[in-house]
Image: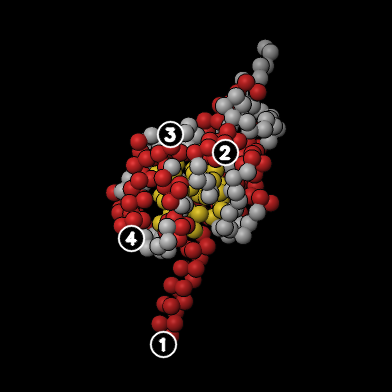
Amino acid sequence: MTNQAAPAQVPPRSDLRRRVLAGEPTVGLFINLASAVSAEIVARAGYDWTVVDLEHGPGTEAELLGQLLAIQATPTAAVVRVVSAERMRVGRVLDLGADGLMIPRLETPQDVADTVSWMRYPPAGIRGVAAGTRGAGYGTVPHPQLQALNERILGVFQVESPVAVEAADEMAAIDGVDVLFVGPADLSHSMGIPGAFDDPAFLAALDRVSVAAKAHGKGAGILLRDASEVPAYRARGYDFIGIGSDSGMVMSGARSQLAAARAALA
């Protein structure tokens, strides 16, 4: 009997994009320590997604692959916040195998549409085709099937300024913009009310973003300080919820244990 090779398949990836577009609430954590060990610990805790933060974290693309391997050995999805919205940075991170991208600091629908095009293989976009990369299955995906990978990449676009808030509806209408993600610190500072997260103007901006996202069947995302804030933001329509970071957890845990120890010694 002649052995026949099994037909090539698109490699299994995260189903996070499907879940988000289906309206399923998800919870994630930012990875700021540039550590594959920290990334694996967080992923094994069972978060739906992580964001490996190349914008504000100390790590670079040189440490990224190890973190992706650690996270993707679990069911947790590995989203990467790129340093900036540039075609080569976007393509390189996707070639390394990220399940999704978080894009900071864009304000116009045209800039967003351009960035989406860098995330997708032709003819849907202009992502460079290199079938031998990790993101393309190391050459195991035939060229006619590469386009199927376009549908698996989650696109998270940050809303960090009043200009972006004004454009939220137009941004959410773009195919490939799967989540509008508010950075509360950046947005409040750019509005001239730094850290005033209860200010009526800030809350109105939050509502405008979530309404725009829901009107187009997209996710509304936000980074919160701790889990106690989740109910209030869920009530405002937010369902792609990040709660802190690995570095923040180390700091809060260290402070808590130190305070308890000092109290016991007093």
User: Is residue 47 visible in the rendered structure shown here?
Assistant: no
| Left or right: where 209 falls relative to 110 | left
Q: Earlier in the sequence, mark 3 or mark 4?
A: 3
Relative placement, left or right, of 99 versus 178 is right
- Judge the density around disc 2: few (<14), some (14-19), many (≥20) Cα neighbours within 10 Å: many
The crowding category of the residue bearing disc 1, from other C-alpha atoms within 10 Å (few below 14, some 14 to 19, many at least 20), is few
- Residue 35 in the figure: left or right of residue 185: right
The answer to which quarter of the image holds residue 143 is top right
Q: Earlier in the sequence, mark 1 or mark 2?
A: 2
Q: Which residue is mark 3?
A: 173
* Front residue of 238 and 113: 113
- Per the image, the residue denoted by label 1 is 266
Measured Cα–Cα span from mark 3 to mark 4: 28 Å
- Residue at position x 29%, y 49% in the image: 235
Residue 240 x %, y %: 41, 46
Q: Are marks 3 and 4 in contact (CB under 8 Å)?
A: no
Does 134 sit above or below residue 193?
above
Tell which circle, 1 or 4, labels the residue nearer the N-terminal end. 4
Which element is circle 2 on? Answer: helix
Note whether 192 is above or below 18 in the view shown.
Answer: below
Q: Marks 1 and 2, Cα distance to the nearest angstrom? A: 57 Å
In the image, what residue type sits under mark 4? Asp
Calculate the distance from the C-alpha at mark 1 to the C-alpha at mark 3: 59 Å
Q: Which residue is mark 4?
A: 199
Residue found at x 48% / y 47% = 158
Residue 202 in the image: state x and y as whole percent. Answer: 36, 56
Residue highlighted by disc 2 = 115
> Which tag, 2 or 3, sits closer to the chain's start?
2
Q: In what element is the residue under mark 1?
A: loop
Residue 219 rendering spot, x and y as whole percentages = 40, 41
